[in-house]
Image (cartoon, rainbow, N blue to C red):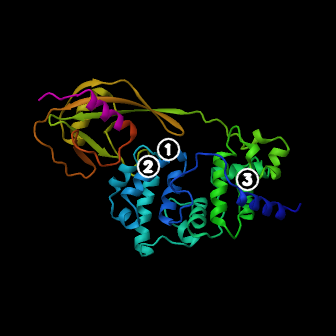
């Protein structure tokens, strides 16, 4: 069989497939609104579908279209993203919405190159939007599609660049000019429910007769195992400062780095004996140390963050008014309504549950 015929047969078999497995009744499945496709594709980057569902539904409920997202503050957007991780995705969504409003009259672009030019959108995401929203022929190569193609055509190049280049050629050859939306949805569903990383369900796979890895008994070889990353650890001290009015001091983190743009407790870089002077110099506030809580661990992709919460009392009696927009005193009794990292939310919840009070 010629390679081109194999690609055509692969496409036709996948287009005829009716997924017999449950669990893919997702709110964005076969969605044709480019805005909703965009939101779901960005959320699905590096995040499992089951985790995304409640975030997607809440996000669409609050920001149903580009104008509502454009008019929202970055704090409102990050607040709805809290817990989903990889917060640069939310910042890029907000920025892209503003660019769409300015450069495309508020209409999501239909041209592949214009979509690709938006912040946070790579080749595969742009292809998914083109295919799912507009029905244009545009190959995708997300994690699921990558695994299906690698197994079906035994792509095992050692170098990542060579392997990815070959997989893109296969994806382009397999993606049909017609029924592109259906094909794209099916290739993602096949990888998610059948051609899974472990224990694939080959017996119900619609392309099993064409699968090179299946016929050569090489299923377990794909995808190629990445070298295990030795997770490093980093240690930080977060100063949890509470005043007599039951308010917490929060500080917006820089736009780059971990938790970029989110609100967190001040990160103290020195020895505990110097925290009073450091706090006075940076925030013009006097504090007294109350206690240190046990370590709190938070795992990122490549490292573990060990957080030492240092609980302090703001001893100044007056109500502080900060002139810096990146500092705020937030009441424990009011909704936070801003993006806050999960470990910080955990600490805030603990403060509330233990009914920690400062001394007047």
Q: Residue at x 19, y 41 (%)?
A: 284
Horizontal side, residue 193 vs residue 358: left or right: right
C-alpha gap between disc 1 and disc 3: 25 Å
Q: Residue at x 75, y 52 (%)?
A: 206
Q: Which percent across, then down, holds residue 290?
A: 23, 25
Q: Which percent across, then down, holds residue 238?
A: 33, 34
Q: Secondary structure at mark 1?
A: helix
Residue highlighted by disc 1: 51
The mark that comes first in sequence, 2 or 3, is 2
Q: Residue at x 24, y 37 (%)?
A: 279
Q: Nearer the viewer, mark 1 or mark 3?
A: 1
Residue highlighted by disc 3: 149
C-alpha gap between disc 1 and disc 2: 8 Å
- Magenta-drawn stretch contains 346: yes
- Magenta-drawn stretch contains 355: yes
Q: Which percent across, then down, holds residue 158?
A: 76, 46
Q: Marks 2 and 1: in contact by CB < 8 Å?
A: yes
**Image: magenta residue range:** 345-360
Among the 4 quarters of the image, the one containing residue 241: top left
Among the 4 quarters of the image, the one containing residue 346: top left
Residue highlighted by disc 2: 55
Q: Which percent across, then down, holds residue 323?
A: 20, 52
Q: Secondary structure at mark 2?
A: helix
Q: Nearer the viewer, residue 268 or 165?
A: 165
C-alpha gap between disc 2 and disc 3: 30 Å
Q: Residue at x 15, y 34 (%)?
A: 244
Q: Residues within 10 Å of mark 1 (few under 14, many from 20)?
A: few
Q: Residues within 10 Å of mark 2 (few under 14, many from 20)?
A: some
Q: Residues within 10 Å of mark 3 (few under 14, many from 20)?
A: many
């Amino acid at each position: 069989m010629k390679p081109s015929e194999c690609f055509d047969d692969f496409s036709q078999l996948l287009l005829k497939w009716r997924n017999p497995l449950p669990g893919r009744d997702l709110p964005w499945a076969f969605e044709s609104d480019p805005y909703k496709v965009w939101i779901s594709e960005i959320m699905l980057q590096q995040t499992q579908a089951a985790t995304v569902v409640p975030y997607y539904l809440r996000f669409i409920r609050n920001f149903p279209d580009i104008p509502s997202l454009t008019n929202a503050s970055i704090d409102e957007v990050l607040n709805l993203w809290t817990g989903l991780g990889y917060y640069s995705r939310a910042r890029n969504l907000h920025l892209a919405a503003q660019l769409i409003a300015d450069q495309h009259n508020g209409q999501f672009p239909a041209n592949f190159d214009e979509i690709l030019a938006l912040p946070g959108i790579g080749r595969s995401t742009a292809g998914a939007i083109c295919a799912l929203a507009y029905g244009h022929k545009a190959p995708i190569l997300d994690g699921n599609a990558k695994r299906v193609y690698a197994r079906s055509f035994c792509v095992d190049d050692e170098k990542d660049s060579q392997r990815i280049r070959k997989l893109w050629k296969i994806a382009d050859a397999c993606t049909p000019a017609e029924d592109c939306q259906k094909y794209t949805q099916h290739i993602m569903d096949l990888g998610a429910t059948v051609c899974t990383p472990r224990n694939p369900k080959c017996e119900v796979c619609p392309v099993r007769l064409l699968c090179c890895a299946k016929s050569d008994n090489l299923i377990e070889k794909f995808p190629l195992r990445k070298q295990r990353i030795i997770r490093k650890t980093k240690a930080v001290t977060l100063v949890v400062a509470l005043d007599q009015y039951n308010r917490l001091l929060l500080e917006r983190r820089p736009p780059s780095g971990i938790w970029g743009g989110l609100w967190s407790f001040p990160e103290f870089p020195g020895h505990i004996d110097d925290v009073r002077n450091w706090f006075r110099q940076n925030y013009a506030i006097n504090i007294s140390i109350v206690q240190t809580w046990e370590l709190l661990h938070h795992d990122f992709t490549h490292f573990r963050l060990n957080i030492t919460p240092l609980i302090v009392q703001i001893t100044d009696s007056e109500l502080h008014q900060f002139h810096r927009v990146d500092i705020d005193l937030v009441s424990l009794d009011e909704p936070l309504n801003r993006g806050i990292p999960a470990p910080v939310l955990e600490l805030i919840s603990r403060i509330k549950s233990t009914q920690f009070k400062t001394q007047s």
